[in-house]
Image (cartoon, grey):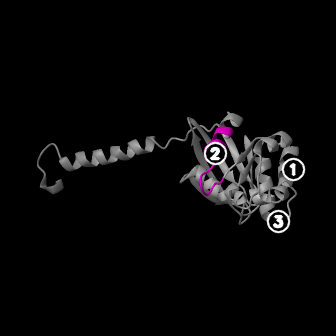
Amino acid sequence: MNCHQCQSTTCHSHSKNNWFTSLFKKKKTQTIERETTGKIALVGMPNVGKSVLFNALTGIYVDISNYPGTTVEISHGKFQIDNDYFSIIDTPGMYSLLPITEEERVARDLLLQDSLSLAIHVVEAKNLARMLTLTFQLIEAGFPTLLAVNMIDEAEKLKIKIDPLTLEDELGIPVIKMSAATGFGLDQLKRRILSYVS
């Protein structure tokens, strides 16, 4: 039986199907994996805004899976700075490189297993002093580290002043003041990532 009783040698239905198929073929070629410039991990205690920063950097390019052998969820993503592409992972909350909980063990293992270009230690500006212990551990363990002092807007409301240049001199690593929730400092963070990793 001919399509729509079409007796013509040129069937418009077939040409539409060919066009439809070619459209999907074009889309498929656009999803080629791009080579990444570096691997980045977000590290920090729970509730410091790591996930907010992760979402601000990656947007919709996120993959969530359980770490093998555990129920701990790990978020993987990618983001772009200029012409460079980076892969990024949001590690579970951790207080120390010496793990007590399963989440801390997974976070430590991720840092040790992946060949990292940069570990971004996200800290809460209001509680900076007590969070620097992990910063020192990361530095002493030899991880390339950048300190992201997050929620700076909340700290400034409490009249807490933080000088990133002084911190950089004392720690010997890049330091950024930012608020991931509002986007403040995000562009500066990207600039520092690019200069540090590239």
Q: Is residue 72 visible?
A: yes
Per the rendering, the mark at residue 137 is 1
Specify whether residue 45 is painted magenta. Answer: no
Residue of label 3: 101
Label 1 vs 3, first from the N-terminus:
3
Amino acid type shown at disc 2: Ser
- Confirm or deny contact between disc 1 and disc 2 (CB under 8 A): no
Q: Which one is closest to the eye, mark 1 or mark 3?
A: 1
Q: Position of residue 186 (x, y in %)?
A: 62, 47
Category of crowding for the residue at label 3, using alpha-carbon neighbours closer than 10 angstroms: few (below 14), some (14–19), many (at least 20):
few
- Confirm or deny contact between disc 2 and disc 3 (CB under 8 A): no
Give the structural element (helix, strand or loop) at label 1: helix
Specify whether residue 189 is painted magenta. Answer: yes
Q: CA distance from mark 2 to mark 3?
A: 26 Å
Q: CA distance from mark 1 to mark 2?
A: 23 Å
Q: Position of residue 79 (x, y in %)?
A: 58, 45
Category of crowding for the residue at label 1, using alpha-carbon neighbours closer than 10 angstroms: few (below 14), some (14–19), many (at least 20):
some
**Region rendered in magenta:** 179-192
Seen at 55% across and 53% down, the residue is 59
Seen at 83% across and 48% down, the residue is 138
Amino acid type shown at disc 3: Thr
Seen at 77% across and 41% down, the residue is 165
Residue of label 2: 87
Q: Position of residue 164 (x, y in %)?
A: 76, 45
